[in-house]
Image: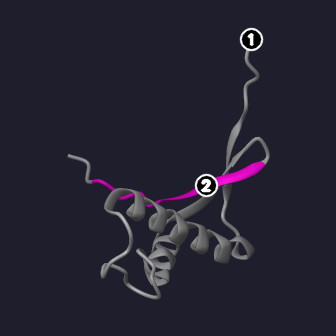
Amino acid sequence: MTESAEIILVPLTFSDREQFIKDNQEAFRYGATVEFGPRRERCEEDEEIISRAEIERSIDEGEAYLIVYKGRVNGGLVIKLKESAVI
């Protein structure tokens, strides 16, 4: 029988914000490199695929969480829910 591991979403705190931004930039940089090859002229600032301003706007306009697996931060996400009209 396999050991079950719990995935926990932990709300992002102000003290986690800077690392969250850096981790997002690194993930986007990695993904772009894998998908499109080495960097060319597609970066917005200081060789970043996604700007700090864009990540900060996402955090501020949504709800940001750290993904914790087996007691270790393994990622993060931002959720922004839109209210839908009831018809």
Q: Is residue 56 above or below residue 30?
A: below
Please provide the residue range marked out in magenta: 72-84
The residue lying furthest to the bottom in this view is 46
Q: Is residue 4 left or right of residue 32?
A: right
Q: Is residue 69 left or right of residue 56?
A: right
Sequence-wise first label, 2 or 1: 1
Tell me which corner region of the image, top left, top right, bottom left or bottom right, holds residue 66. bottom right
Q: Verify whether residue 45 appears in magenta.
A: no
The residue lying furthest to the top in this view is 1
User: How many angstroms separate mark 2 from mark 1 (CA)?
Assistant: 27 Å
Q: Quadrant of the N terminus?
A: top right
User: What residue is drawn where x is 51% and y is 71%?
Assistant: 25
Residue 50 percent coordinates (x, y): 42, 75
Q: Secondary structure at mark 1?
A: loop
Query: How would you rate the neighbour count of disc 1 (Cα within 10 Å): few for under 14, some for 14-19, many for 20 or more?
Result: few
Q: Nearer the viewer, residue 7 or 31?
A: 31
Report which residue position mark 1 lands on.
1
Query: How would you rate the neighbour count of disc 2 (Cα within 10 Å): few for under 14, some for 14-19, many for 20 or more?
Result: some
Residue 42 percent coordinates (x, y): 31, 78
Kind of residue at disc 2: Gly
The residue lying furthest to the left in this view is 87
Residue 74 percent coordinates (x, y): 66, 51
User: What residue is drawn where x is 62% and y is 69%?
Assistant: 20
The circle on residue 75 is 2
Kind of residue at disc 1: Met
Q: Main secondary structure of the magenta part?
A: strand
Q: Verify whether residue 78 appears in magenta.
A: yes
The circle on residue 15 is none
Q: Is residue 42 left or right of residue 29?
A: left
Tell me which corner region of the image, top left, top right, bottom left or bottom right, holds residue 10. bottom right
Q: Secondary structure at mark 2?
A: strand
